[in-house]
Image (cartoon, helix red, strand yellow):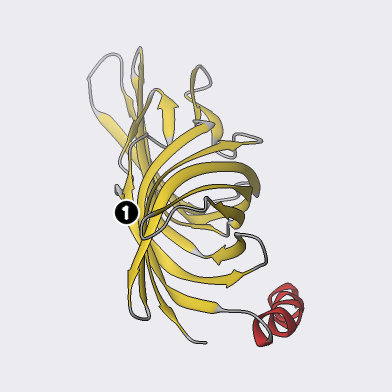
Amino acid sequence: MRAIVLFLLIVPICCSQTVFVGAVAGGRLTDDVAGVARPESKRYVVGPMIEVSLPVGFSVEFEAIYHRHGYTAEAFHFNQVQIDRERANSWEFPVLLRYKLPVPRVRPFLEAGVAPRTISGTISTTFTAYDVITGQPTISTATVPTNWDTSIGFVAGVGVQFGVGRLRFSPEGRYTHWNNRPVNGVILDREPFYSTRNQFDVLVGIGWRLR
């Protein structure tokens, strides 16, 4: 329902302005988790985008960025060993207001906005308890869906924009600060792990002018 409402709001704007559609892709420079967890997320990010031009050098861009999220957390305590392994899909939905400086050919720009994020997947746990006399291990396993909260990111970026004909390229550096730590837990009731709140990406947007 939210996607339908957003679409209905965007369409009237797009009908009267210059519109670019395309994709954004790049790499993440920062880890997703910290603490005892070992980050295992993929570094690439990718997704579709649409940019709508506004008067006096402004534009608004809507994106849906996919990122493969994962970690392994291990803890050892006396005769117990626990290993948690998460594999999940992370989706960010940046809405960015962009201002292009009035420089010909290569146009520097500044941008700012917000980015809701959802992370969904599974966590696999392996728990091993060793008999203190015989050393015999007892192993149990379980897999549960993630239950991470939605995050809101506050986004700022800087880049340049240039094009050939209807094709447009937008390399940029982008910083996101998240309002919470959706991944926030402990392993063996003592070792913490948690999401990082500061994120840096290097991205390239490729768009095609529709009108």
Q: Position of residue 43 (x, y in %)?
A: 29, 47
Give the residue drawn at x 48%, y 86%.
210
For mark 1, what is the residue? Answer: 26
Where, by quadrant of the figure, is residue 39 drawn?
top left
Residue 99: horizontal and vertical position, in percent?
Answer: 58, 52
In the depicted view, which residue is nearer to us: 162 or 141? 162
**How many labels sit on residues?**
1
Residue 19 position, x and y percent, is 55, 79
Q: How dense is the environment of label 1, judged by Cα within 10 Å: few (below 14), some, or many (20 and up)?
A: some
Q: Does residue 166 appear in this view?
A: yes
**Residue, x 33% and y 80% (percent of image)?**
165
Identify which residue is drawn at 74% across, 73% down.
2
Left or right for 177, reference 75:
right
Q: Secondary structure at mark 1?
A: strand
Question: Would you place residue 82 above or below residue 91 in this image?
Answer: above
Q: Nearer the viewer, residue 191 or 104?
A: 104
Q: Image height check: is 58 above or below 151? A: below
Q: Which residue is more in the foreground, 87 or 137? A: 87
